[in-house]
Image (cartoon, grey):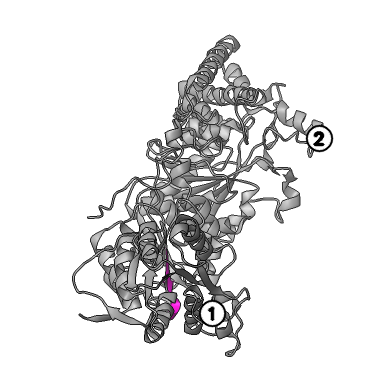
């Protein structure tokens, strides 16, 4: 039987919030939080909070720019899911690879692409991380080991495994994170890849960002199982359920899987519980879920949870946190300005990058 | 010069490139321990070991995608499709990933992968195993498509395809694996994108590729006896297309017939004929002729199968029509 991660509790057993006997609200898994204070230190935790808040403000601005017609096409906002992207980046090293689905703005920033370059890409500008030729769903930065940004649901998973295959082939000490949604888990090619990843012991972590809705289809209408982690069992792969609304739980869950990949060259499937507060894309009013459901989820906003915890734990005061927000909002405005002012790609770029510029010189 | 079978020539190309570059590996169904479904990879596992010659489960989309991901970060995979009929399952990976990576990343990535295997009808295999599907790949900017017709071309072009920095779809001919041809001992490469005149002539140009080259050559022999001199141009590479070679030949003969094994509607042959009709309009003395498979799924019955495919008599008739000879 595959190893089940046991270091952290299943989120299904841990309600979003619970009252302690003294009446204070506990928002985060206490064990993971205590461990994080000890191992990461308060400053690192504050940095993670700031990253989450930055993603939130970035996406809010992207949404506004979209409504103003500055950003076109599809635009899938990440609002509500921030702990997952931050945990992915924090649990890995710079040399590790990341391959994402289409809701990729926050992951790109977390992996080290500047917010300026991501915003410029959304604007279709030449200073975008894909020179304006990729768009929202196709963010790339080879130097940062960020390999997309994928528009075909589930199509990124064999590619991610291929990246992991190459790392192993070359004896690189590098782990690959392959991200997918609860919608893509049922694609055939994803299952083909799980089988080969386990068969060939690839150093990869498959991360399901399970926000419960595949576009407008709630999971119970699309999945024959309610716990997606059991899919790993069919392939003898390790798996775990992770609370993606709790930054510490997410961090340690991912970290453990990354360590397995690094030390043992073994894949893991993580089913990370999360929730998007916006629609599937900007054109989606999300009428398939109730107002009450959304309100209940927003009441457990992962950023507010961490913020309350930081204050209750006396790591930062509310005033200090509010000051962060002012700073971050200014940063995001600057990214917006950068994107506005960046030129569109020159028309000479239109015909470039279809094939490698290459004369007949193969010696 | 020594003679090698088409499959042996391919095998030599693979062996030489595996030996030349550690980043090259071969992956596919039955390529290693079984020595290849069509024995193209025979002996390679013994020579290069299981790290470089890798058997996969039957998961065309999955292992094509794994190869593409490995190519994105700099390895040079050769992915064998047992046949291109099965590569249909991997089409998403090939057209949406391999072909698009460079463009979508603004030139940051390349995808130096070869997807290779046999295509075309091979004799009584029925409708699902007899298709010529090159059009699916030739249609896609970002891919290169090569279809060699001789052992010599097969070896030189496969070596080039493996060294090429872009994704190359390399479609072999299932029927021709055992056919022999001259292949020199010394190393050589054939550039991708260059056609080859397989027979010189003055009255009519035949533009074709893969197995149909041999059908055309057979017909040309018969036509020569009847006083009609046919030039057979083997396109070899369908994307990029050697337009210069086509121009040169048609300007000389002023007549052209395009022959393909695939179905004809919205096909590669249709595009080649369109190119000749438009680009060389002033040089043409007759409408561009076309031959292609009948628009019918391949029947199994021994008597029905040949009715689907262009044969020498069809070619003779088509050339005569183009030459206004009864």
Q: Which residue is mark 1?
A: B309
Magenta stretch: helix, strand or loop mostly: strand
Return the residue nearer the eye: B288 or A208: B288
Return the residue nearer the eye: B9 or A185: B9
Question: Is A152 displayed left or right of B238 in the figure?
Answer: right
Q: Which residue lies most toward the bottom here?
A: B303
From this view, report whether residue A56 is shown above or below residue B82: above
Observer able to see residue B24: no
Q: Position of residue A211 (x, y in %)?
A: 66, 40
Return the residue nearer the eye: B22 or B111: B111
Residue at 60 percent across and 77 percent down: it is B127
What distance separates the C-alpha of mark 1 from that of mark 2?
60 Å
Q: Position of residue A36 (x, y in %)?
A: 50, 29
Identify the secondary structure beneath mark 2.
Answer: loop
Identify the secondary structure beneath mark 1.
Answer: loop
Q: Chain of mark 1?
A: B
Span colored in magenta = B170-175
Q: Are marks 1 and 2 in contact (CB under 8 Å)?
A: no
Residue B204 in magenta? Answer: no
Q: Position of residue A192 (x, y in %)?
A: 54, 60
Q: Chain of mark 2?
A: A
From this view, report whether residue B16 is shown above or below residue B217: above
Observer able to see residue A253: yes
* Residue A290 - label: 2
Residue at 47 percent across and 22 percent down: it is A342
Residue at 73 percent across and 43 percent down: it is A216
Crowding around mark 2 (Cα neighbors within 10 Å: few <14, some 14 to 19, many 20+) is few
Question: Is A269 displayed left or right of B69 in the figure?
Answer: right
């Amino acid at each position: 039987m595959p190893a089940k991660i046991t270091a952290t509790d299943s989120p299904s057993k841990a309600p979003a919030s619970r009252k302690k006997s003294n009446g204070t609200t506990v928002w985060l898994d206490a064990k993971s939080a205590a461990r994080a204070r000890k191992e990461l230190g308060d400053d690192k935790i504050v940095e993670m909070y700031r990253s989450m808040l930055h993603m939130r403000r970035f996406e809010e601005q992207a949404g506004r720019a979209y409504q103003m017609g500055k950003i076109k096409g599809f635009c899938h906002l990440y609002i509500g899911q921030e702990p997952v992207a931050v945990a992915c980046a924090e649990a890995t090293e710079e040399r590790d690879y990341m391959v994402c689905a289409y809701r990729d703005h926050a992951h790109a920033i977390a992996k080290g692409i500047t917010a300026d370059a991501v915003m410029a890409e959304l604007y279709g500008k030449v200073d975008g991380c894909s020179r304006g030729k990729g768009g929202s769903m196709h963010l790339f930065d080879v130097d940062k080991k960020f390999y997309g940004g994928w528009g075909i649901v589930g199509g990124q998973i064999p590619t991610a495994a291929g990246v992991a295959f190459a790392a192993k082939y070359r004896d690189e000490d590098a782990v690959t994170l392959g991200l997918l949604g609860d919608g893509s888990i049922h694609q055939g090619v994803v299952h083909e890849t799980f089988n080969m990843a386990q068969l060939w012991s690839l150093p990869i972590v498959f991360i399901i960002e399970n926000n419960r809705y595949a576009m407008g289809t709630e999971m119970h209408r699309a999945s024959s199982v309610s716990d997606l982690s059991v899919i790993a069992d069919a392939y003898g792969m390790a798996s775990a359920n992770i609370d993606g609304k709790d930054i510490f739980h997410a961090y340690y869950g991912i970290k453990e899987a990354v360590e397995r990949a690094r030390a043992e060259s073994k894949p893991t499937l993580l089913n990370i519980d999360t929730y998007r507060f916006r629609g599937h894309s900007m054109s989606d009013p999300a009428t398939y879920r109730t107002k009450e459901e959304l309100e209940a989820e927003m009441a457990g906003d992962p950023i507010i949870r961490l913020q309350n915890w930081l204050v209750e734990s006396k790591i930062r005061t509310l005033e200090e946190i509010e000051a962060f927000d002012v700073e971050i909002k200014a940063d995001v405005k600057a990214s917006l300005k950068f994107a506005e002012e960046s030129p569109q790609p020159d028309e000479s770029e239109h015909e470039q990058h279809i094939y490698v510029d290459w004369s007949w010189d193969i010696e | 010069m020594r003679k090698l079978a088409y499959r042996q020539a391919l095998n030599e190309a693979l062996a030489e490139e595996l030996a030349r570059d550690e980043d090259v590996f071969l992956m596919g169904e039955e390529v290693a321990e079984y020595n290849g479904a069509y024995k193209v990879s025979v002996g390679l596992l013994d020579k290069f070991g299981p790290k470089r010659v890798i058997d996969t489960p039957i998961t065309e989309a999955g292992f094509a995608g794994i190869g593409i991901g490995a190519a994105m970060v700099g390895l040079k995979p050769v992915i064998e499709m047992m046949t291109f009929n099965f590569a249909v399952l991997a089409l998403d990976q090939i057209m949406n990933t391999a072909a698009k990576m460079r463009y979508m990343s603004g030139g940051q990535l390349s995808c130096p992968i070869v997807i290779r295997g046999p295509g075309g009808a091979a004799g009584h295999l029925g409708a699902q195993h007899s298709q010529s599907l090159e059009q699916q790949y030739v249609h896609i900017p970002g891919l290169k498509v090569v279809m060699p017709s001789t052992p010599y071309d097969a070896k030189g072009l496969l070596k080039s395809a493996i060294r090429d920095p872009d994704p190359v779809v390399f479609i072999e001919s299932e029927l021709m694996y055992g056919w022999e041809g001259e292949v020199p001992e010394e190393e050589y490469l054939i550039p991708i994108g260059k056609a080859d005149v397989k027979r010189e002539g003055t009255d009519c140009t035949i533009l074709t590729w893969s197995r149909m080259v041999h059908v055309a050559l057979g017909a040309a022999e018969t036509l020569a006896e009847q006083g009609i001199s046919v030039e057979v141009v083997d396109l070899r590479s369908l994307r990029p297309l050697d337009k210069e070679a086509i121009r040169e030949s048609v300007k000389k003969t002023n007549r052209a017939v395009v022959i393909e094994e695939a179905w004809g509607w919205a096909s590669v042959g249709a595009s080649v004929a369109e190119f000749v009709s438009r680009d060389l309009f002033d040089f043409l003395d007759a409408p561009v002729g076309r031959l292609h498979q009948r628009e019918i799924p391949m029947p199994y019955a021994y008597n029905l199968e040949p009715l689907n495919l262009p044969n020498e008599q069809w070619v003779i008739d088509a050339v005569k029509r183009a030459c206004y000879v009864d």
